[in-house]
Image (cartoon, rainbow, N blue to C red):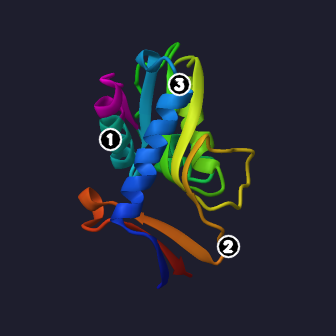
Amino acid sequence: MNIKAQIMDEQAIRRALTRISYEIIERMPDLSNAVLVGIKTRGIPIAKVLKKNIVASTGVDIPLYQLDARNYRDDINPEQRTDSKFSGDIAGKDVILVDDVLFTGRTTRAAIEAILDAGRASSIKLAVLVDRGHRELPVKADFVGKNIPTSMKEKVVVAVGPLDGETGVFIYEQ
């Protein structure tokens, strides 16, 4: 794959996540009932930043859970599945599901299924750093850092410092 463009640098990501944090605060008046659920892998560090921003602005310490949605995906081999299940305390909670890129909607669908398997949430909202379109399922993010129109021949990659050594959003040509 060849890099086509860098869409966001570290500062742009920081601004987008700050804005998403404020949008969450504004639209969810009862943060004491909210939980953040970061989708593995890059949704987790993004959720950690959102949590830090929300705590700094409101003083409310929102629980943060990590979710591996692979077991619930409809496009993997059954042999690749593990016995692990999501075990977050989400019954009656307002769940904010966090991911890096919203593309087809399949990961989001799998994550919602995992959450519902763990208990009945009061509500589920979706926060993503990048929405690139091309949905296969009727999924729409409630909180979006940046909409990036892309072609199907492009790949959007979010790099986060703790995992990748650099921070940015990049478009690659396949």
Label 3 environment density (alpha carbons within 10 Å; few <14, some 14–19, many ≥20): few
For label 1, the SS is helix
Residue 124, relative to residue 73: is it above or below? above
Judge depth for marks 1 and 3 and give the one in front.
Answer: 3
- Decide if residue 55 is in sight here: yes
Among the two numbered marks 1 and 3 on one chain, the one whose residue lies closer to the N terminus: 3
The residue carrying mark 2 is 152
How many angstroms separate mark 3 from mark 2 (CA)? Answer: 34 Å
How many angstroms separate mark 1 from mark 3 (CA)? Answer: 18 Å
Q: Residue at x 37, y 45 (%)?
A: 44
Residue 90, relative to residue 159: is it above or below? above
Label 1 environment density (alpha carbons within 10 Å; few <14, some 14–19, many ≥20): some
Residue 160, relative to residue 107: is it above or below? below
| Residue range corresponding to the magenta coloring | 54-66
Judge depth for marks 2 and 1 and give the one in front.
Answer: 1
Considering every residue shown, the one lying at the far bottom of the view is 2
In the image, is residue 168 part of the stretch drawn in magenta?
no
Among the two numbered marks 2 and 1 on one chain, the one whose residue lies closer to the N terminus: 1
Q: Which mark is residue 28?
A: 3
**Quarter of the image where the C terminus is located:** bottom right
The residue carrying mark 1 is 48
Answer with the quarter of the image where residue 135 lies. bottom right
- Decide if residue 118 is in sight here: no
Considering every residue shown, the one lying at the far top of the view is 92
Q: Residue at x 30, y 37 (%)?
A: 52
Are the residues at dot 2 and dot 1 in contact (C-beta closer than 8 Å)? no
Residue 97 lies, in percent from the top left, at 50, 37
Answer with the quarter of the image where residue 64 lies. top left
How many angstroms separate mark 2 from mark 1 (CA)? Answer: 30 Å
Answer with the quarter of the image where residue 173 lies. bottom right
Are the residues at dot 3 and dot 2 in contact (C-beta closer than 8 Å)? no
> Which amino acid, by three-letter code, is at mark 1?
Lys
